[in-house]
Image (spheres, rainbow, N blue to C red):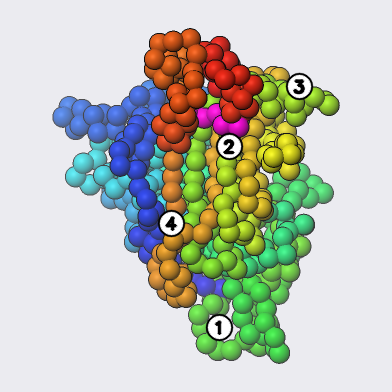
Amino acid sequence: MTGASHEQDWNLPSNLYQNTFEQKSEKIGSLSFPRKFENQDFVHLRDYCLKHGILFEDDTFPAHYSSIGPKVLPEDKLRRIKWLRPIDIMRYPRLFVDGVNRADILQGQIGDCWVLAALGSLTRQQRFLKNVIPKDQGFEDIYAGIFHFRFWQFGDWVDVVIDDRLPFLDDNFLFVHPRSKNEFWPPLLEKAYAKLRGSYTNLDQGYLTEALVDFTGGVEMPFNLKNPPDSLFEMLKTAAESGCLMGCTTPKGKFPGNIQLENGIVQLHAYTVIWATEVPYMDGKESLVRLWNPYGNTEWKGAWSDRSMEWNHVPVSYRKKLYEDKDDGEFWISYKDFRENFSFLIICNDVPTCLDSGEQRNTTWSVEKHVNTFSGASLGNSYYEDSLSRNPQYFIQVPEPEMKNYNLVVALSQDPRNDTDRVHIGFIIVRVTSQGKTIVNSTKLQPQRDVVNCFYLSPGTYIIIPTTTQEGEGTEFLLRTFLKSRNNFSFDPTPRDEKNELPPAVTKDVQKWNQDNSYRTIFLKYANQSSFLDASQLQRILNEVLLKGKATFFILNLSVEYAMDNTLEEEHFVRLL
């Protein structure tokens, strides 16, 4: 098992991933100008406290049992909770001690292993970690009892301000606690995430997929380990080499709760996936996966675990690099045993680089983001027709040449502020040809925050239609599409991990429009204040508006409507949009 001494062997440089194309202007919700959660400005509040010689107290997430929330603890224990600042319990607290490492984290009395497993993976990727933990804070010169952390929420980066009063029960950390007594980044970050989610209770049981996305702003790829793609282990290695965040979960057992099995695996629990590799073994090779348990101990006891005899049959050079006997929650497990004991693998990155497994390196992922509201849909035989006519539609063109692997990822999210009242969401993919329209995929409607799937589509024209039940009508959604294509760069056979670079990505944000005003304004602008559009005016709209990504509508429907009549009236134009 590999300890901290080998961390740098596989830790990719902080500047590994840089988009080839970057937006020229920043907007509110970007990393440079994150949205202020609860309208709290960290710098303004800190400067005010420093000027007046006081320590910050956050009234929006108070040191009160209401911030803990119900169900986590019985009422008698809630009354015994004390909220203490780090300076109350030790003389020289620090935000970091010897940097940031997953070994700093020890899970407390709440079922937020899904958060901590994602956090354990985050500590390995500096390019993401620096976005979540700003450097302009600490317990030294500018200490004022105030800290802030950043999370990605529904298309925006959000800056969450907290005070440093932490909950203690019987002189012990109530929730996550650091391995080093004077290091406080784990409980402070956990508190900020609890504030974003509404309470500590809302961290008790959750989805690892959501935490990975919230820490990166990326796209998560969940894989069912009971029915995985044939190439999943190759994807796993590619994901590790390309700097993805990864985690996995165990299934529910016969008994409720996080029961430790005889083999050391904890049921209904989340783990960090650290690495994947192959080692020479006997007369062949063995595929291995490296995991970390947020408990900080409790490890796998089977083949390839600490002190297992399998390591005696591995060349010394591999043992030196990979193996270490240490009770720190980290262990190796064979890919076969991994599949048998775990239920889901989740991989997350800016773009789905794990799907580049086996591909030539000269590929690029284009990313489009659309924010809109569901119009609702009727279930039954008319589901497709109703969705096609009522819900927003998004046109994509899958380019030549034809790919041999997954080339499209669709990620649909509903507004996280509806967390306690989520609706069922999904999407339809329709192919358009000269012969008509054909459904090529229809996801099952699910009551999840995020619905994500990957596809292999042959070159052609497609429509993506977000769908929901009638109860979801009016709910805001975020649609992101990740489309792979060949780029124009010459192919360089140098392995990616030696070049320290990832495939480029092109990102385009398509903002939500006010349909009642913007569409009519555009019509009148291009119609020159007349009551219809002629052919040349329609062409200008398509070229100057649609192709620049300022509006989202389905070009073919518009063209068909126009073909029915040589002029397009305002009523038809607005209705189509």
Residue furthest to the left in view is: 51
Left/right of residue 8 with respect to residue 393 in the rendered view: left
The residue wearing badge 2 is 395
Compute the Cα span from label 1 to label 2: 52 Å
Q: Secondary structure at mark 3?
A: loop
Of 76 and 370, the residue lying toward us? 370
Q: Of the two numbered discs 3 and 2 on the same chain, state the one appearing first in sequence.
A: 3
Q: Hey, what amino acid is under mark 4?
A: Pro
Q: Of the two numbered discs 1 and 2 on the same chain, state the one appearing first in sequence.
A: 1
Q: Of the two numbered discs 4 and 1 on the same chain, state the one appearing first in sequence.
A: 1
Compute the Cα span from label 4 to label 2: 22 Å
Image position, residue 329 (x, y; %) = 57, 63
Compute the Cα span from label 1 to label 3: 59 Å
Q: Secondary structure at mark 2?
A: strand
Of 150 and 381, the residue lying toward us? 381
Quadrant of image for the C terminus: top right
Left/right of residue 342 with respect to residue 314 in the rendered view: right
The residue carrying pointer 3 sits among few (fewer than 14), some (14 to 19) or many (20 or more) residues within 10 Å by Cα, namely some
The residue carrying pointer 1 sits among few (fewer than 14), some (14 to 19) or many (20 or more) residues within 10 Å by Cα, namely some
Q: Of the two numbered discs 1 and 3 on the same chain, state the one appearing first in sequence.
A: 1
The residue wearing badge 1 is 319
